[in-house]
């Protein structure tokens, strides 16, 4: 079929080569609105134009996008075909299990399993598995990596099977860094060239919500659930409603002493107030032009925290500088610049040049040093108000994000005796696995200077017995972690400089504080070593614990048993300070209730201070040599000091050398992993990997596509009544597994001992564990459970099961779900605002579906989780006007009917009928949050994966 817009195929000079491209300036001759369209929308338009085949993408789709208007009604869906897909291992392993299950299903039906094959490149970066079991010592990295491979061998063997089974599936092994930083520094190539010589811009989706970090180099991409990513890699477009594009105009410059972290926390607070959920955010203006790519990437990274689909920065000279500094080839850089200039998309726009749905303004000069917390990333606190805010929240009610503690207990302290760090008995402390088995000598913590060797021995030995008093507000975890900040040399160098000045002033970190440095790339260790700053961080016990997400995703490892006991016994509200992007309840550590996001230098400062009940703007950080007060201003580095060292962080040759080793020198541990071979997976008995029950009795014939298919839910029991801001961490935790939990009991019953439980995230390849882990977060509150004396609420994944005889029994949500499913009784969940906020994890939707929950009725949904629910065949429904489950006076004893429009028209009205035990009833109208026509098809097929498999087998 001839291309409907073949006349837009033009040629351009790309370095020494001549290439062709689908020209947006040529398209603008017919559709003049294109000229003033936001850059991010033009990149989406280019994909629609280039992929216009008359089938998946039609000429009408091109016309609809080309006629984008800033404030039009959003009723049309865009089929967006991406250039590639990126995965991290917590979401990548279950995705690989789904692909393997699709192949197994095809084989059972007598079809060629090879039909299930990704059509675009897929890169999985292993970054979520390493935990901070060991810290503060020279061999922490070695010990943690050995434990990582011990715990995750079955998962890694499964990945190796995937590498040989699928032609387009690649793995970046453990120990290289965090997926988003590796994507930014290595995987992203700027523009691609098809076999036909057609150039096109990079684009992607990733199975992690912080995929948006790539927006910092002008790449359109965002996070999706694993099931939606599978559809994308198997050739399906990513469908979305035509978005609003909010323009954020940045003016001025950051003040001395302010960091990109302070800026992104300010942006997060600002844009949450402007309600940008489901919208593109595009940065423009003179202030945007001043920001280096690492700063832009930091802001793009936290788009999920401010609710946007993307936080996009156009390609400009700063982008080219970054490509040079990270070792991209001259040819790639020339092609990137030439392509974007040919498309008229090179450079950051200024005010008035483009049309946005809404313009928000921020003067960079008004940004101040800040933290966010203690429970949500959007709750920014100026540095000088942290002590005051913690004190207020300590006794504030839970409804006000407080801790509901008696104010008079704020100064409570508990004395305990620590006997030293308890090492895992399976890992010999001496001799450790040598670093050279994993990475080269120049990249390892093994590179110690004489200074560090002389200074750090005592401070870096947490095994020494000690007496310590801990109390409310004490910092017990201080972690330089996360792609959000460790990708940014400016803030890492600042942390190193602050550590240097602190050591020289005589400050030290108390040994009971769990400190860690977990860079998102080995490059970080290399430039900290080159600049001579690493020894000072080590002196303060910020030694490298791993190259991965660690504390930011809850892989902080445990605290000393004595500390855990003291926290529980005295009900202490202790703190973690981390350079991460999320701080939801129980995410960082189940016993740490107050979690603050901060820049890396502030993480070090708070580790030195030891408490958030110290105002670092008006009180000294601590006592230095001779008992002298040392103030934050004494040790805070200047912008000039940081810039003098920046050349060491942007060394293109070092980046090339490092990433060449992904294939040539992946490390002895990875080489020692051997997977099975073959097109299909054998599914050996395993508590890590099991064939997911996604295709039971699979019928390759499509279901009825009309009103004859009954889509109503009748006489459902209420599984849970939740409040606002229920995160995907609440729904499907990633962290530690309690022995007493349903998942813990299942693992024990299958011969897994407590030390080998690993985490929920690492076991996402096994549905038996993950079903039992759904709604198992230790901090989740089911408001169906009556309040405790004093008004507080019971925490943990429990519900009230009601049998057919009027009897009520409290039990775990999993156990109740199994009983209801055995009775053939559907269930529903009610919730408040922002249901499903947080990570992209598709297990929050998979687990919901596997527990027999047919519908979730909430005040509002976060973008990715709503899409995931539809993708798993669960109805998302949204309250209208002022209706809430509280206004319906629900207590969980009711029976519920959900009656959608039989045709499932997108965003149509649905009826919810509530029947009470006394015979009365109440009916309200809600909005069906199936948003597009393709989502209707997904739901009717039972989810995205059955839909895609039917298409593949019919081809």
Image (cartoon, grey):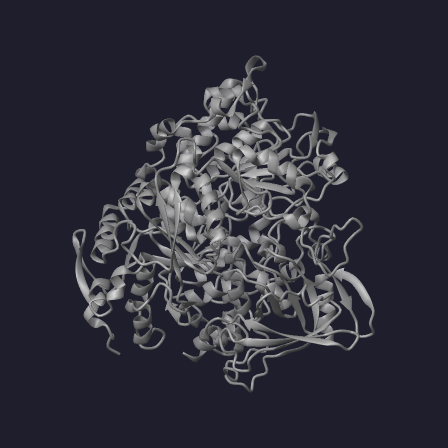
What percent of the width, then of the height, locates residue 812?
A: 73, 60
What percent of the width, then of the height, locates residue 804?
A: 80, 75
Viewport quadrant of the N terminus: bottom left
Query: Is 59 displayed left or right of 86 in the figure?
Result: left
What percent of the width, then of the height, locates residue 487?
A: 42, 41
Residue beneath the point at 62% across and 31% down? 611
Query: Is 208 displayed left or right of 424 in the figure?
Result: left
The answer to which image quadrant residue 801 occupies is bottom right
What percent of the width, then of the height, locates residue 235?
A: 39, 69
Query: Is 775 displayed left or right of 163 in the figure?
Result: right
| Viewer-proximal residue among 386 and 588 | 386
Q: Is residue 907 visible?
A: yes
Residue at the outermost bottom position: 708
What is the count of numbered marks?
Answer: 0
Viewport quadrant of the C terminus: bottom left
Residue beneath the point at 75% across and 59% down? 785
| Viewer-proximal residue among 815 and 787 | 787
| Viewer-proximal residue among 20 and 80 | 80
Q: Is residue 312 above or below residue 922?
A: above
Residue at the outermost top position: 626
Residue at the outermost front position: 882
Q: Is residue 173 visible?
A: no
């Amino acid at each position: 079929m001839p291309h409907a817009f073949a006349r837009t195929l033009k040629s351009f000079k790309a370095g020494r080569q001549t290439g062709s491209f689908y020209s947006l300036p040529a398209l603008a001759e017919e559709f003049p609105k294109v000229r003033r369209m936001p850059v991010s929308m033009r990149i989406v338009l280019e994909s629609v134009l280039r992929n216009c085949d008359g089938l998946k993408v039609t000429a009408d789709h091109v016309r609809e996008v080309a006629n984008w208007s800033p404030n039009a009604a959003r009723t049309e869906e865009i089929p967006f075909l991406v250039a590639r897909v990126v995965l991290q291992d917590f979401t990548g392993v279950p995705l690989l299990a789904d692909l393997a299950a699709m192949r197994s299903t095809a084989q059972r039906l007598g079809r060629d399993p090879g039909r299930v094959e990704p059509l675009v490149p897929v890169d999985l970066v292993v970054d979520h598995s390493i935990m901070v079991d060991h810290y503060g010592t020279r061999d922490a990295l070695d010990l943690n990596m050995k434990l990582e491979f011990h715990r995750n061998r079955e998962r890694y063997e499964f990945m190796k099977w995937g590498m040989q089974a699928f032609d387009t599936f690649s793995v970046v092994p453990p120990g290289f860094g965090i997926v988003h930083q590796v994507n930014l520094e290595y995987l992203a190539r700027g523009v691609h060239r098809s076999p036909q010589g057609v150039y096109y811009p990079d684009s992607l989706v990733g199975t992690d919500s912080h995929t948006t970090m790539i927006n910092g180099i002008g790449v359109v991409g965002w996070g999706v659930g694993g099931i939606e990513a599978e559809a994308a890699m198997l050739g399906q477009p990513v469908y979305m409603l035509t978005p609003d594009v909010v323009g954020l105009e940045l003016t001025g410059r950051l003040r001395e002493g302010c960091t990109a972290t302070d800026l992104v926390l300010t942006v997060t607070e600002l844009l949450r107030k402007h309600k940008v959920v489901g919208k593109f955010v595009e940065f423009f203006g003179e202030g945007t032009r001043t920001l280096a790519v690492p700063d832009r990437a930091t802001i793009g990274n936290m788009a999920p925290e401010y609710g946007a689909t993307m936080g996009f920065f156009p390609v400009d000279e700063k982008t080219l500088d970054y490509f040079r500094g990270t070792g991209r080839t001259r040819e790639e850089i020339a092609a990137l610049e030439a392509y974007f200039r040919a498309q008229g998309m090179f450079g950051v726009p200024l005010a008035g040049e483009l049309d946005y749905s809404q313009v928000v303004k921020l003067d960079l000069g008004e940004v101040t040093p800040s933290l966010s917390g203690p429970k949500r990333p959007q709750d920014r606190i100026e540095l000088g108000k942290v002590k005051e805010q913690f004190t207020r929240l300590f006794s504030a009610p839970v409804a006000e994000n407080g801790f509901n503690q008696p104010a008079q207990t704020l100064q409570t302290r508990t004395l305990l005796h620590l006997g030293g760090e308890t090492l895992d008995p399976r890992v010999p402390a001496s001799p450790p696995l040598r670093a050279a088995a994993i990475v080269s000598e120049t990249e390892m913590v093994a590179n110690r200077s004489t200074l560090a060797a002389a200074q750090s021995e005592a401070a870096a030995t947490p095994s020494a017995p000690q007496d310590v008093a801990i109390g409310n507000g004490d910092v017990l975890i201080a972690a330089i972690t996360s792609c959000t900040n460790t990708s940014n040399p400016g803030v890492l160098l600042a942390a190193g400089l602050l550590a240097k000045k602190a050591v020289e002033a005589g400050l030290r970190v108390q040994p009971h504080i769990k400190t860690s440095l977990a860079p998102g790339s080995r490059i970080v260790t290399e430039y900290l070593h080159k600049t001579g700053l690493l020894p000072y961080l080590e002196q303060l016990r910020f030694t490298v614990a791993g190259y991965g997400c660690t504390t930011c995703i809850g892989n902080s490892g445990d605290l000393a048993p004595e500390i855990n006991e003291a926290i529980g016994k005295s009900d202490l509200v202790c703190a973690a300070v981390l350079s991460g992007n999320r701080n939801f309840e129980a995410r960082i550590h189940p016993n740490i209730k107050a979690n603050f996001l901060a820049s890396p230098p502030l993480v070090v400062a708070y580790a030195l201070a030891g408490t958030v009940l110290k105002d670092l703007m008006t009180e000294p950080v601590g006592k230095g040599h001779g008992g002298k007060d040392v103030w934050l201003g004494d040790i805070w580095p200047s912008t000039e000091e940081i810039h003098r060292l920046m050349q060491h962080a942007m060394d293109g040759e070092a980046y090339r050398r490092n990433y060449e080793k992904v294939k040539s020198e992946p490390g002895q541990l990875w080489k020692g992993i051997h997977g099975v071979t073959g097109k299909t997976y054998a599914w050996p008995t395993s508590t890590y990997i099991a064939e997911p029950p996604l295709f039971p009795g699979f019928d390759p014939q499509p279901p009825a596509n009309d009103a004859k298919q009954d889509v109503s839910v009748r006489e459902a029991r209420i599984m849970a009544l939740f409040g606002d801001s229920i995160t995907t961490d609440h729904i499907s935790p990633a962290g530690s597994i309690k022995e007493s939990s349903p998942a813990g009991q299942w693992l024990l019953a299958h011969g897994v001992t407590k030390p080998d439980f690993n985490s929920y995230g690492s076991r996402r390849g096994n549905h038996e564990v993950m079903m039992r882990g759904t709604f198992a977060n230790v901090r989740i509150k089911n408001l169906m459970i009556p309040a405790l004396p004093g008004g507080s609420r019971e925490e943990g994944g429990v519900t009230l099961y009601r049998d057919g005889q009027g009897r009520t029994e409290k039990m775990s949500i999993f156990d109740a779900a199994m009983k209801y499913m055995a009775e053939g009784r559907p269930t529903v969940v009610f919730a408040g605002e922002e249901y499903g906020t947080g990570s992209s994890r598709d297990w929050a939707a998979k687990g919901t579906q596997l527990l027999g929950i047919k519908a979730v009725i909430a005040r509002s949904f976060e973008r990715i989780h709503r899409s995931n629910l539809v993708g798993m065949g669960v109805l998302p429904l949204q309250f209208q006007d002022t209706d809430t489950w509280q206004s319906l006076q629900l207590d969980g004893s009711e029976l519920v009917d959900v009656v959608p429009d039989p045709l499932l028209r997108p965003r149509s009205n649905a009826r919810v009928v509530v029947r009470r035990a006394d015979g009365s009833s109440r009916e309200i109208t809600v909005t069906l949050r199936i948003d597009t026509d393709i989502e209707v098809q997904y739901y009717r097929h039972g989810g995205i994966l059955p839909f895609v498999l039917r298409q593949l087998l019919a081809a």
